[in-house]
Image (spheres, rainbow, N blue to C red):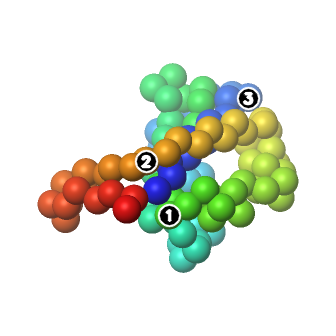
Amino acid sequence: MITVFTTFSLQKPITREEARTIFKSTAPKYQGVQGLFRKVYVLSEDGATAGGVYLWNSRAEAEATYTESWRAFVREKYGTEPTVIYFESPVLVDNVTGQVLTDE
């Protein structure tokens, strides 16, 4: 499994309510994406940085999303260049299902 953190500095800070509206507008584009288990939208306490935490089945499936087209979408929507950082996720604790999952 792969966890990806994406972040981008906003030109102007936004409120939690503004973030919720914006994030809800983009959420449907991530439904049903091949290999994406979960996406969590994030907003810093000061409202100046936003992004997402994604859990993917594989790096290849993640990389298929973070294309130049995706970067252009972020630049157009938020007016800034995103950063994308990949992490290996060999173990996942899921308290909702009560499971410990591994990448084996």
The residue most toward the front is 104
What residue sits 73% from the left and 29% below the top?
11
Residue 51 x %, y %: 58, 41
The residue most toward the top is 46
Identity, as a three-letter code, of the amino acid under mark 2: Ser
Identity, as a three-letter code, of the amino acid under mark 3: Gln
Side of 39 where 64 appears, left or right: right
Is 17 in front, or is 33?
Answer: 33
Report whether residue 12 is seen: yes
What residue sits 45% from the left and 26% below the top?
45
The residue pinned by badge 3 equals 11
Give how far apart the Cα atoms at labels 1 and 3 are: 33 Å
What residue sits 83% from the left and 58% below the top?
69
Side of 90 where 46 appears, left or right: right
What mark, if any, has residue 57 been given in the picture?
Answer: 1
Residue 21 x %, y %: 54, 53
Give how far apart the Cα atoms at labels 3 and 2 are: 32 Å
Residue 42 x %, y %: 49, 41
Give the secondary structure at mark 2.
loop
Eye-nearest disc, 1 or 3: 1
- Work out whether mark 2 precedes mark 1 in sequence or the reverse, and give the earlier one: 1
Give the secondary structure at mark 1.
loop
Q: Residues within 10 Å of mark 1 (few under 14, many from 20)?
A: some
Report whether residue 27 is seen: no
Give the secondary structure at mark 3.
loop
The residue pinned by badge 2 equals 89
The C terminus appears in which quarter of the rendering?
bottom left
Q: Residues within 10 Å of mark 3 (few under 14, many from 20)?
A: few
Q: Residues within 10 Å of mark 2 (few under 14, many from 20)?
A: some
101 is higher (above) or lower (below) than 4: below
1 is higher (above) or lower (below) than 31: above
